[in-house]
Amino acid sequence: MGWFTESGYWLSRLVFLRALAAVYAIAFLAAALQFRALIGEHGMLPVPRFVRRVPFRRSPSLFHWAYSDRLFACVAWGGAVLSAAVVAGAADAMPLWASMLMWAAMWALYLSIVNVGQTWYGFGWESLLLETGTLAVFLGNAHTAPPVPVLWLLRWLLFRLEFGAGLIKMRGDRCWRDLTCLYYHHGTQPMPGPLSWFFHHLPRPLHRVETAANHVAQLGLPVLLFTPQPIASWAAGFMIVTQLWLVASGNFAWLNWLTIVIAFSVVDGVRAADVLGLPKPPVLAAPPGWYEGLVLAATAGVLALSWWPARNLVTRGQIMNYSFNRLHLVNAYGAFGSITRVRTEVAVEGTSDTGITPETVWREYGFKGKPGPLGRLPRQWAPYHLRLDWLMWFAALSPGYAEPWFLAFVARLLAGDRATLKLLRHNPFPGEPPAHVRARLYRYRFTSWRQLRDTGQWWERTLVREYLPPVDLDSAARLVQP
């Protein structure tokens, strides 16, 4: 079947697959370094308790057959090593069938983690990584030219990702329609980066240009992905530029980077190779029949499963970041349908005093990514994902987001749990755990240029209310859900 492959996309596939493997490696690394405190045997939301309540058919995962922290660590670190090997070119050095098995193994291992990750893994970019990883299984390696059906499925994925995000904005918060959302967003986004303060202080007319450019990138350009080259490449290129702008302005784990990776699959490899002065692709043999059959079967499956996300795009009740099946194969995407105008942060404090008085001295715990000390410039963490810091942002929006895990987090601080303390930047009680812990809700604002010059502080904050009254270990343990 001469139409089945297109050797001109050899460079696009090479960049796409190596970069996707790098994202996989980061995801597995984040899981390996954070799981014990979050979902380990003695974590805030333990996997053993979850798999006792939820059957395999609702959350397919190898951990339904057996779970231990050692096994989870083997899965996470094994996935990281496998991903790193693919980045180094191992999949291209193997036969086609072995390469496909490597990609399938990465997908299965990460699916096993996501499906028992509960609240900690409830982010749209988890499903995006799994769906993209599924398509990578069928994209082939250096032994065969890229299959055209899978290249089109990647465009369909990028279309849903961007167009869904654009529609949810236009159907949601009014500020997207009047171009004022970015008056607030750089200062209220979940985890600001080192340049977010400067983006926040851009002139308001430029904020309106930012918002309008976002609408063009998410509502106009996705349609051009299905046009002939070089138009599709130019559309993908502009999407990459807008995603790099988002990378510079905040920390969104690997969402922006993975979007960039998918967009690279659209770029015409022949033209790109000419620009870069690279050699022509080698002449490749026709793909084996069994491979063509698998690709066509996978394509038919994706098209069948696309009914639900396609219908979601055209309905007024559009939902975002939703998986219509437990394997996260074809999903609905979207982000920031509404924008927070006011930034609130939960500050967690402890004291060694056994009796609480007005003179009690409270010392604040420091988090790695979320705002805390007023003079500390936000750090760049993306594409690495700080799961606790992200959930703390949601907890500040509403205590309902904190119900499954926050009291368990406090109880582990009171117990001096080492795995939990490793998730933090600063532990004010290095000797022994505090006697009491409390939480307070503050309103945070970026300082002005003058305030920064006079005080050296990037933030100012005012107390809103008490978030959690002082608790000791016994009372916290009683309040934690069994």
Image: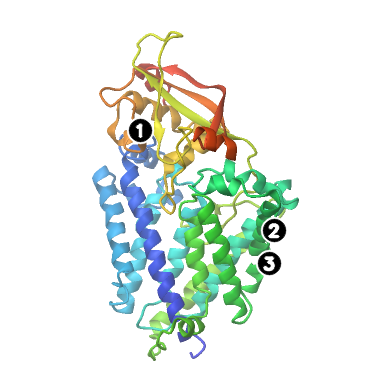
Kind of residue at disc 3:
Gly
- Answer whether labels 3 and 2 touch (C-beta < 8 Å): no
Q: Position of residue 308 (x, y in %)?
A: 61, 60
* Front disc: 3 or 1: 1
Residue at image x 37%, y 62%?
22
Q: Position of residue 318 (x, y in %)?
A: 66, 53
399 displayed left or right of 176: left
Which dot marks residue 426?
1
Q: Is residue 215 visible?
A: yes
Q: Quadrant of residue 332?
A: bottom right
The correct choice, above or below, for 33 with respect to 309 in the image is: above
Q: Position of residue 412 (x, y in %)?
A: 34, 28
**SS at circle 3:** helix
Q: Position of residue 216 (x, y in %)?
A: 68, 63
Dot 1 crowding, Cα within 10 Å, few <14, some 14–19, many 20+: some
Residue at image x 55%, y 55%?
246
Which residue is denoted by mark 2 in the rendering? Answer: 212
Q: Nearer the viewer, residue 292 or 276?
A: 276
Q: Quadrant of residue 93?
A: bottom left
Cα separation, mark 1 vs mark 2, equals: 40 Å
Kind of residue at disc 1:
His
106 displayed left or right of 371: left
Q: Nearer the viewer, residue 248 or 387?
A: 248
The correct choice, above or below, for 64 with respect to 230 in the image is: above
* Front disc: 3 or 2: 2
Cα separation, mark 3 vs mark 2, equals: 11 Å
Which residue is denoted by mark 3 in the rendering? Answer: 220
Mark 1 and mark 2 lie on one chain; the one further toward the N terminus is 2
Cα separation, mark 3 vs mark 1, equals: 45 Å
Q: Residue furthest right?
A: 178
**SS at circle 2:** helix
Q: Residue furthest front?
A: 454
